[in-house]
Image (tube, helix red, strand yellow):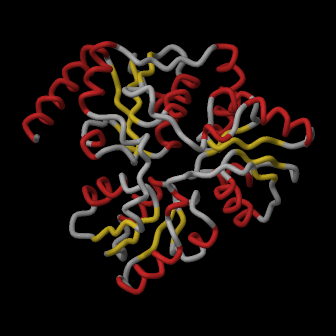
Amino acid sequence: MKNRDTELTQKVSTLKKKRNAVILVHNYQLGEVQDIADFVGDSLELSQNAAKTGADVIVFCGVHFMAETASIVCPDKVVLLPDINAGCPMANMITAERLRAMKKEHPAAVVVCYINSSAEVKAESDICCTSANAVEIVGSLDTRDLIFIPDQYLGHYVSARTGGKMILWPGFCPTHIRIEPERIKELKREYPQAKVVVHPECRPEVIALADEVASTSGMCRYAQRPEVKEMVVGTEIGIIHRLRKENPGKRFIPVSEQAICPNMKLITLEKVVRSLEEMSPEVKVPERIRLKAVAAVNRMLEVGLK
């Protein structure tokens, strides 16, 4: 297996040079895929890296909305998603048509769109956010009338942090709702010295038990603190690979071995090789949608520059 992985890794390296490609990989991807990345990160970091890359080809090892975001900010690049079936159940919980209906009910509201959504939904929104910057984004808006889509739990967390009331879409991440507060309590008893760090897509009763609430890259930064020797990790278990790789000698305990996103696990080394060989599957957002969606994405990126 190791020889096979080495062979595939070498093929990726050769093809990457041939195509002038960059490989962007989300923290939830398989370890073997993370290990071939030019950059591993969360949605915000991957969006930022896509926006500034000088490569001709972006191989996005994540899920469909992430590749769409790269296409939105890089219309002149070829964006490849090695498995076109890698979708996001949360993103599928809202459509542009249903959002337009909600906007008619609240015509004065500003729509804050979590990046975990389709290009069509982004095109109907005023500003995007990620789990890393949602509190900052909402705090930057001078309005009391907000619609937050599609993750009700991230929205609840942001509302609690900012003190603002928001109209929340009833979407959620099926992976993060598998993280149970009872299990965290058990792990706190079993590992009394461990820090509990959870993702803001978790339910409020889970967040209430955490020492820290952070995006995946926020978790990686937190793990590097010298006082953190053991860490209970409340998010998709793919991140454990990166945490252990970057922090040898520290212990990382997943809250649930069932916190797996099957879509994030669809991409393999073989599929990355095939994608670079065949230059497909390509994700391309139609220009009429892209022009509207890019305004919401760029507005998000500009907040981080202020």
For residue 251, side relative to residue 51 (left or right)? left
Left or right relative to 47: residue 259: left
How many numbered tags mark residues here?
0
Q: Is residue 209 above or below residue 61?
A: below
Residue 283, image x and y in percent?
A: 49, 20
- From the top left corner, tell me how far across and down residue 289 is, in percent: 68, 19
- Residue drawn at x 41%, y 65% is 256
* Depicted 74 relative to depicted 46: above or below: above
Residue 228 sits above or below residue 34 on the image: below
Residue at x-position 60% and y-position 75%: 208
Q: Is residue 274 left or right of residue 112?
A: left
**How far across and down, in percent of the image, does residue 32 sit?**
24, 42
Give me the residue at 64% from left, 44% from top. Answer: 114
**Along the viewing direction, whichever of 32 and 57 lies nearer the viewer:** 32
- Which of 274 and 133 lies nearest the eye of the viewer? 274
* Residue 39 position by quadrant: top left
Residue at x 41%, y 68% (from the top left corner):
255
